[in-house]
Amino acid sequence: MTLKPGALSLEDLLAIHRGGITLSLDPAARPIIEASAAIVRRAAEGSEPVYGVNTGFGKLANQRISEADLARLQLNLIRSHSVGVGEPLQPAVVRLMLATKAASLARGASGVRPVVIDQLLAVFNAGLVPYVPSQGSVGASGDLAPLSHMTLALIGEGEFLVEGRRRPAAAMLAEAGLAPLQLAAKEGLALINGTQTSTALALHGLLSFEPVLEAALVVGALTVDAARGSDGPFDPRIHALRGQPGQIDVAQYYRALLAGSQIRKSHETGDDRVQDPYCLRCQPQVVGACLDQLRHAALVLLREANAVTDNPLVLAADAMAVAIAEVGAIAERRIAMLIDAGVSRLPPFLTANAGLNSGFMIAHVTAAALASENKSLAHPASVDSLPTSANQEDHVSMATFAARRLQAMIHNTAHILGIELLAAGQGIEFLRPLRSSTALEQAHALLRENCPSVDEDRFLAPDIERATALVTGGALSRVFRTLGGLPALWVAV
């Protein structure tokens, strides 16, 4: 894949995230990079103070550095800033860091030599993953600690992560036929002054949530049929009057998923219920608003991935957190509705012999616990700031944590949806011999291939994990995508 600075698409970023590709730099970028590097070289040779070239950093910006020490200044910067802690970032995140850092530097506004970008791409193409601890960045002046750890590996002083084990960078570079990068003036600063870690973490959240959100639509529709809900609330005329794009699209998704359901046909007449609970009939309004938030976040992240440097990321990550939490919250409410015989008109707790069996009683408690945990994790990072660098950086974004916490929230939401899938599948079976729509019967068959019906109480945790794997692994996402003719989730990007 050719890396075109400033022109990365979401599809490009998805390919980088997945891995298994090689990157090459667009040749048209090289003259611009070389011209930018020449400007820094002249500044380094001059007598005027230039921040980060011949001065210290942060609160030490007034300290002049001699020409003889300029390369050492950049090396010391990387060493001193490699202070991260915690579990290492996942390879998919580090791949995005390497590629977006290369793309940013290749814009020709950072003053690095082409060899710096070549090293980033060579490491990516060799399949090497720098060992980068996940904690330690507040998003001020860039993701300093994690990008320093990445750079430390490029210069042969850090470590690479190989099959879960830390290996010395120098040895791994040699094994791949690569020489350690030698930093020149400003290049250490250019490598760590950016938001590539925050961006990569947020993109990782967006891209890994996509199949979960598609699964949520399939599972939500299955629950509508299990509860013998109406598809009337998904009428396009209702949503066109409001005009919210996400809401309109989600209503269209649900109409397509429910089309042709015998269960729906069976109660179009003779059903005395006037309206369904909010968790069924207001799914377009709730999930549609989440979709609008996610689409906006995707746009922000795409701009940031193509940027030289900036930091609107924290607000995008906060918006994503709220959307992820809300998708899980309404799923938890649908589970609660299904196990309540007074609302769902299904057997209590979805078990034929309630009392002797508890059915889905405590599975719902787990879903409630996860939904509650997500509410705490959704607390906006954008309202928090702690001054750093002796108050020189006195208002910081906390964007890195804002993006990093998304994985825990996606994990929770996926498990809520896994529990709902089990519950909705059980509910559908109480309505046999009636059949649901083709798409939803396909989803039900996938469930039963992995998890048998819960006819009596049994150890249910393994079933929850297997059902959750259908949510996260893309099986239900593929059911959604077989419908065809529907707007894509990230249609606005």
Image (spheres, rainbow, N blue to C red):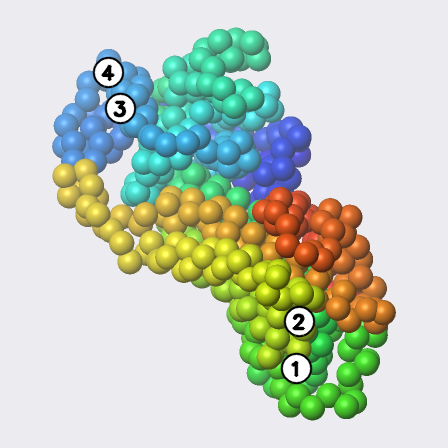
Q: In the image shown, does 122 or 362 lie closer to the viewer?
A: 362
Verify CB contact (< 8 Å) between mark 1 and mark 2. Answer: no
Residue drawn at point x = 62 percent, y = 70 percent = 348
Q: CA distance from mark 3 to mark 2?
A: 63 Å
Q: Earlier in the sequence, mark 3 or mark 2?
A: 3
Q: Which element carries disc 4, helix, strand or loop?
A: helix
Residue drawn at point x = 66 percent, y = 77 percent = 345
Q: In the image shown, does 348 or 76 lie closer to the viewer?
A: 348
Three-letter amino acid code at the position of disc 4: Asp
Residue of label 4: 69
Answer whether residue 373 is visible to the viewer in this image: yes
Verify CB contact (< 8 Å) between mark 1 and mark 3. Answer: no
Question: From the viewer's perspective, is the residue at label 3 or at label 2 nearer?
Answer: 2
Question: From the viewer's perspective, is the residue at label 1 or at label 3 nearer?
Answer: 1
Three-letter amino acid code at the position of disc 3: Ser
**Crowd class of label 3 (few under 14; some 14 to 19; many from 20; radius 10 Å):** few
Residue of label 3: 80
User: Up-down: is 328 above or below 309?
Assistant: below
Q: Earlier in the sequence, mark 1 or mark 4?
A: 4
Question: From the viewer's perspective, is the residue at label 4 or at label 3 nearer?
Answer: 3
Question: From the viewer's perspective, is the residue at label 2 or at label 4 nearer?
Answer: 2
Residue of label 2: 347
Q: CA distance from mark 2 to mark 4?
A: 77 Å
**Crowd class of label 2 (few under 14; some 14 to 19; many from 20; radius 10 Å):** some
Residue of label 1: 233
